[in-house]
Amino acid sequence: MMKNLKHCLIRVLSCVLSMVLVSLIVPSGIFASAATVRKRALVISAPYDYGAISPATVDGMYNMFVSQGITTTKYVNNAATNSSVFSKINSVLGSASSTDISYIFIQCHGTSTGQLAINGSGKTYMTLSALKTQLDKISGQKIILLNSCYAGNAISKSLNSADDNVSYAQLMINQFIYGDNESQIVPNSGEFNGDTDYVIFCSSMKDEESYSYTNSYAFAAYAWALGAGYSMDYNAATNLYADKNKDQIITVKEYYDYSKQKVLSMCSSGHEQTICYYSFSDYYSIFYNDYPLGDINQDRAITAADVMLVRQHVSEIITLTGRQFQLADMSGDGKVDAQDTLLIRRYVALM
């Protein structure tokens, strides 16, 4: 009986030590998040005009979401209408529960009065209030990445400290340029502020244009993708560049800080573009690793197979890159070395 008791105590002690080690080397909340949160993304784009709106941006954002393990749908339609876009939003995201996260990337031309030009003719516009009314029907958290000129209208963020509405003269100019479609439209501004169901990143302030490389990616989308671990240059997963503290979690503030500086560095003199955002919390995790640290082969178990992979990398037999490299960096120091091998071996030994 004493022998059995001894074995029980050893097993209990092993479990306790295992839990302690997991708490030290695995970011808090990852297991719970992976088990309870479904993540889906919808990439919406106005048709390509190969000057400002190109397939490179759409494909890059699509691949970024996929590299994050997010089920992703792409929607580009030359004959898009408000109804068709809303129908796609509902079909892709409508079944979300209160614990789910829905990502919406929108790329299109925008007007200074806060309308989104959603089809190729440039005569069908979507107001920000209409978009929000539709997205309000989707349960759970909504993370919006809006890439258009004057995108900051969505959250009423301006380069000027005074947040003035567009003047009557500007409305008249817009009506002349865009036709009767804007004759009954009043300025949209700040629709997405103050709602805890939303986190929204805008490619530019409400009084700025958004830029892109000719026939290539938009500045903001490039920065958003790279920050979340996907390089449009190499069409491949890479490090989570926005993850400043290397905890495998990208918070709202980390994402903003990284993308804002990245876009500013890409702009030429006289063509400034300033990322802006709204969130109910700077510390909300918008991207995070669904796999626990150490699960290098991503089979949702940390085993001897993962130990072998990190050993082979340290011995230069193989080279771990992208997400596998991140999962192998147990110590979080940006390297995969003997220390990481030791940490993962200890974890497996305790399991």
Image (tube, rainbow, N blue to C red):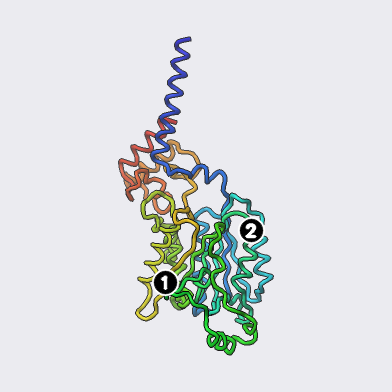
* Amino acid on which the number 2 mark rests in the picture: Ile
Mark sitting on residue 49: none
In terms of depth relative to the viewer, which is nearer, 169 or 56?
Answer: 169
Position of residue 312 in the picture relative to residue 102 (left or right): left
* Amino acid on which the number 1 mark rests in the picture: Thr
- Residue 160 vertical placement versus 26 (above, below): below
- Residue 79 vertical placement versus 236 (above, below): below
Counting from the top left corner in percent of width and height, residue 311 is at 35, 41
Q: What residue sits right under mark 1 in the picture?
A: 274
Residue under the image location 57 percent in, 68 percent down: 191
Residue 71, visible in the rendered structure: no
In terms of depth relative to the viewer, which is nearer, 130 or 318?
Answer: 130
Residue under the image location 56 percent in, 85 percent down: 171
Q: Furthest residue to the top?
A: 1
**How many numbered markers are drawn?**
2
Q: Furthest residue to the bottom?
A: 176
CA–CA distance between discs 1 and 2?
Answer: 29 Å
Residue under the image location 68 percent in, 65 percent down: 87
Locate the C terminus by quadrant. Answer: top left
Residue 10, visible in the rendered structure: yes
Residue under the image location 43 percent in, 26 percent down: 14
Q: Secondary structure at mark 1?
A: loop
Position of residue 297 in the picture relative to residue 101 (left or right): left
Mark 1 vs mark 2: which is more N-terminal? 2
Circle 1 residues within 10 Å: few <14, some 14–19, many ≥20:
many
- Residue 215 vertical placement versus 36 (above, below): below
Q: What residue sits right under mark 2 in the picture?
A: 138
Q: Secondary structure at mark 2?
A: loop
